[in-house]
Amino acid sequence: MVETLAKVLLALCGLFVLIGLFYMVFFA
């Protein structure tokens, strides 16, 4: 249960990082 939650949180963090990179690339 805890391991699954940790994996989901890591996936969400990675997704936010990718979105942030795309914003910096397209709006720089």
Image (cartoon, rainbow, N blue to C red):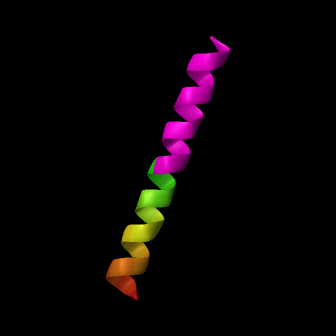
Q: Residue drawn 56% across and 18% down?
A: 4
Q: Residue drawn 42% across and 59% down?
A: 18
* Quarter of the view holding residue 7: top right
Verify whether residue 12 appears in magenta: yes
28, above or below 4, in the image:
below
Q: Residue furthest top?
A: 1
Q: Residue furthest right?
A: 2
21, above or below 14, in the image:
below
Residue bounds of the magenta highlight: 1-14
7, above or below 11, in the image:
above
Q: Main secondary structure of the magenta part?
A: helix
Q: How many marks?
A: 0
Q: What is the x, y in percent for residue 26? A: 32, 80
Q: What is the x, y in percent for residue 6? A: 62, 27
Q: What is the x, y in percent for residue 1? A: 62, 11
26, above or below 13, in the image:
below
Quarter occupied by the C terminus: bottom left
Q: Residue drawn 43% across and 78% down?
A: 24
Q: Residue drawn 47% across and 66% down?
A: 20
Q: Residue furthest left?
A: 26
Verify whether residue 24 appears in magenta: no
| Residue 26 or residue 7, whichever sits in front | 7
Say left or right for 5 vs 20: right
